[in-house]
Amino acid sequence: MNTILFIIQKEFIQVFRNRMMLPIIFVVPLVQLIILVHAATFEMKHIKVSVIDLDMSTTSRKLISKFEGSPFFIIKHTSFSDKLSEQEMKKGNVDMILHIPYGFERRLVKENQAKIQIVIDAINGASAGLIEAYSTTIILDFNREILVDFLSPTVLTATQDINVTTNYWYNPKLNYKTYMVPGILCLLVTIIAFILSGMNIVREKEIGTIEQINVTPIRKIQFITGKLLPFWIIALFELAFGLTLGKLLFNIPIIGSLWLIFLSAAVYIFVILGFGLLISTMTNTQQQSMLVSFFFMVIFILMSGLFTSIESMPEWAQKLDHINPIAYFIRIMRMVMLKGSNFHDIRDSFYSLVVYAIVSISFAVWRYRKVA
Amino acid sequence: MKRFTGFVIKEFYHIFRDYRTLLILFGMPAVQLLLFGYVLTNEIKNARIAIYDASKDEISRKISEKIISSGYFILEKNLMNYSQIGPTFRDGKIKLVIIFGSKFAEKLEREGKADIQILGDASDPNTANILVNYATGIINNYLISINAEQVPMRIIPEVRMQYNPELKGVFMFVPGIMAMLLMLICALMTSLSITREKELGTMELLLVSPLRPIQIIIGKVIPYVVLAFIDSCIILGMGKFVFGVPIEGNIVLLLAICLLYITMALSLGILISSITNSQQIAMTVSLIALLLPTILLSGFIFPVENMPVILQVLCYLMPPKYFITIIKAIMLKGNSFIYIWKESLILILFTLIFIMMAIKKFKIRLA
């Protein structure tokens, strides 16, 4: 037991003597929360529109002013030719073209329906989807309004109407930051734990100090525990720090129990530390270890549902996500923090993490050899 | 010259003997592109929903059927009462709950008005927004079909998705992964390989050799230029032949821009290595100062226009932003040089500044 304590002490001293360590521990979460949360946003606010109004009628003008009045759209450019508008889109000056053809109002009155064309710059599929959703909402609203304008009240009362009310639970204002903060906290814990553990043993290898430890009577399990515990504590501390910052800066809701958050985090960090150690024992230089960690981290993170929802992935990818610990942890964090899910709701993900932690740590211990 | 080639060969040996790194350097673009190309789509389909139908009559059933058969939704659960909604959402599977008011058909028939409530799980706000929109659209279409005789007057929007009709995620990932990987290989790997020589003490050996410092630096850099260039060709080729991402513009121009970006990243790498002495610091600096902005502040995934002004200003100081803009413009929009000369000029400026700073710093170290 004493041996472990000494190793822990040594690791802590090493971490804190490193000039770069303290800034990393405190600055990284700040930077991540402030920059990432603001940068990683799909909240579309200023969709730049180019309007081609060939009809110039009252209805077309009304429709355009509907777009103008919406907080999501800005009319940046008006023209009378498709070519000019498309050029603006090529330059990247507008995101959307609203094309109202000649004879729009006449057709609406005579034939009872008229078409308009919306062209969206879809290179970024996610924003294109949102732009489409926003503009169709406006047009649907407008459709209802013109009914009132054009039809006599007697006809109107004869029609059947379904009144659709929508309600957004847990996040009524659709604040994207609320959604991102839990995910980013996961990212923070993951990166810190992964880098610290992944670079650790390999560094001792590179400098040659691993030899000195190998010739001591320290047992494998003692050595690994001594290496892991300090990082585990640091990572948990980071989570607490990040949660406090998130609460203070963004006032994100923490509806569920804090204990549950930390319990899951405690298990999760072991998973990541195990992975880090495994990579550390399998590589020879820090450069290698860095690359391998980076490779896996990017894949895990992008597949974790942090930015795009897991449900819309193909089935094989969803199956692959069963072995992605980050996906489990992000799900747990979002559910507990935003929806107040209890242990019963998250038990599947939680038990998966427990199994994962046991597997990854024992694998790392097994892989570590005291012979260089 | 002979000495110099010898040195370059030594550097190539360094890289080729480290087969793990090599494997990752070539495997990474391929795997990432494959994965993201197939996995990350922004289309939302098969969202699980629950329906709470308090009236269970002909019309409410018809509407439910319409919603479920639309392809966007899968019915996971029929709820029996209102209080089940909270636990269902907390369980995490269900994204949307649709509630039909009681006596739905009767009300619609008699009063001409009936209520549907749509609840979205907005802990994921964008998905909720899009799904609610789909569902409302389906209900509206139904409404139009039952009112067909009386009030058909409506505007039909025809939406065209320009440049990327299927909303494939891969259209974003080809330029983005290129920007990220070239930055990783050029800036990170060069800075690590130079600081490594410093850390191991072999830099001394190189400096006392008859090679001139500039030759050492260029020799260090050449293998990475080759690697990076091959990688960008792999990404472009895979994008085109596997995922059908078009290359609308001039390919020579495209490759020239890649080379320009590679040079920029390399000079940045040299600058980093001349400032620090340890690999760990070089790595942390590269990771925080390079990769984070390349992924986040470049328009790779998140559009720059949506960010707050301060971050937008930051974005304009990030070289990858210009690179991604140019690549998208040439590849996807088929723009010619006239459209992108400004961005190219800025990239050249960045390169010159980094090289000048690196030279200045490097001389001091040698003295």
Image (cartoon, coloured by chain):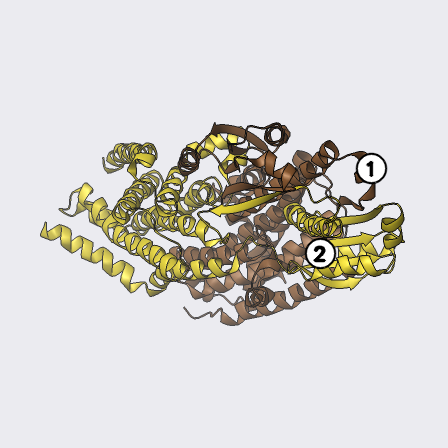
Chain colours: A brown, B yellow
Does residue A315 sit above or below B359 in this rendering? below
Does residue A214 sit above or below A258 in this rendering? below
Tell whether B332 sits left or right of B106: left
In this rendering, the label closer to the viewer, 2 or 1: 1
Pick the front one: B89 or B197: B89
Pick the front one: A275 or B118: B118
Cα distance, mark 2 to mark 1? 64 Å
Percent position of residue A347, x then y: 74, 63
The reply to whether residue A108 is visible in this rendering is yes
Which circle marks residue A154 in the picture? 1
Which circle marks residue A263 in the picture? 2
Q: What element carries label 2?
A: helix
Tell which circle, 2 or 1, labels the residue nearer the N-terminal end. Answer: 1
Label 2 packing within 10 angstroms: few (<14), some (14-19), many (20+) = few
Percent position of residue B19, x then y: 33, 65
Does residue B186 sit above or below A50 in this rendering? below
Percent position of residue B76, x then y: 74, 63
Pick the front one: B66 or B265: B66
Q: How many marks?
A: 2
Label 1 packing within 10 angstroms: few (<14), some (14-19), many (20+) = few
Tell whether A171 sits left or right of A126: right
User: What residue appears at the point 65 percent right and 37 percent down from the top-left corner?
Assistant: A109
Tell whether B175 sits left or right of B260: right
The reply to whether residue A177 is visible in this rendering is no
Q: Mark 2 lies on which chain?
A: A
User: What residue appears at the point 47 percent right and 62 percent down from the top-left corner?
Assistant: A279
Pick the front one: B349 or B268: B349
Q: What element carries label 1?
A: helix
Q: Which amino acid does label 2 sit on?
A: Leu
Percent position of residue A305, x then y: 59, 55
Q: Which amino acid does label 1 sit on?
A: Thr
Do labels 2 and 1 touch, CB within 8 Å?
A: no
